[in-house]
Image (spheres, rainbow, N blue to C red):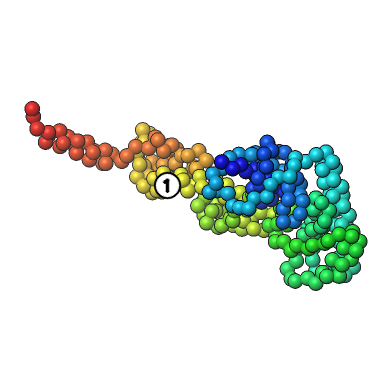
Amino acid sequence: MPELAEIVFSCGGRVYSFDPAGLSLDVGDQVIVRTSRGIELGKVVAASHEVPESEIVAPLEKVIRIASPGDLDAAERNQKLAGRAAQVCEEKIREYGLDMRLISAEVVFDGSKIILSFLSEERVDFRQLVEDLAKKFRTRVEFRQVGVRDEARLIGGYGPCGRKMCCTMFAGDQQPVSIKMAKDQNLPLNPMKISGICGRLMCCLKYEHQCYRDFKERAPRKGAPVRTAQGEGTVADYCVPRETVRIDVGEGRQIEASLDQILPPQQEQEKDGAGSRRGRERRPRR
């Protein structure tokens, strides 16, 4: 079977598949690959592994080599150049009075292009800006307009949970988030509580969503009569992380039980018992 390796080019960026070309690649290895933007330095997030032919989307680019110390030095020089490009660009934006905000600057590994990401609510004529920067740095300059989610990912920061933002930590984390995910998890639909720094729905809403859906499919519906060894009652609420349900047993008292502790209602058990007795009565004698 053919082999694949999964590679990313930035924190929280999209994951791309490459042909390892016979190289034994491990998670964390830095490699040189060819992309549509040119030669780039990437990081392996899934080691070389075999996959069925049907799962491959051709054509696959091959990994050129594992990054050498010289490649890493070149990447460091590019970072410094990107910093200078960002500084000059911001000065020119103020000089020309352009309605745009620079978010990040990046130099492609082979130095053939400087990519500048910016945020703006309107179209911006930055042709003179491109010309000035290309003349200053003697390379091709490309501007890319991004949205607020991309801005948060590129700048980084900490969420209300106290951890680094999900979009900067988890590779390939581009699955859309919907308000239905918050509803399924019984979260307050207050935008202030379920929105991230970018002002959009928090990425983490999707991480436990499938767990909530799976649990609700297995658990009795809310309000359903249930019976446990501690008594009978009705399902009042769910505690999905612990995989338990809260049962109202009357007189303002609730108990907590896991799904395997819930017994069928008494009447169903009696019905099943009566049916088995009738079956024994009809059984012919030998």
Left or right: 209 in relation to 80: left
Can residue 82 be seen here?
yes
Left or right: 89 in relation to 26: right
Q: Residues within 10 Å of mark 1 (few under 14, many from 20)?
A: few
Residue 95: % across, % down: 90, 68
Residue 32: image quadrant is top right
Residue 276: % across, % down: 19, 36
Residue 179: % across, % down: 55, 57
Can residue 88 be seen here?
no
- Quarter holding the N terminus? top right
Seen at 11% across and 36% down, the residue is: 282
- Quarter holding the C terminus? top left
Seen at 65% across and 39% down, the residue is: 47
In-front residue for pair 93/57? 57
Q: Is residue 260 above or below residue 167?
A: above
- Check disc 1 and report the residue beneath it: 217
Seen at 78% across and 70% down, the residue is: 124
Residue 28: % across, % down: 71, 38
In-front residue for pair 5/144? 5
Find the residue positioned furthest to the top: 286
Seen at 75% across and 62% down, the residue is: 144
Q: Is residue 282 above or below residue 126?
A: above
Secondary structure at numbered mark 1: helix
Picture mark count: 1
Q: Is residue 189 above or below residue 55?
A: below
Query: What amino acid type is highlighted by mark number 1?
Result: Glu
Find the residue positioned furthest to the right: 136
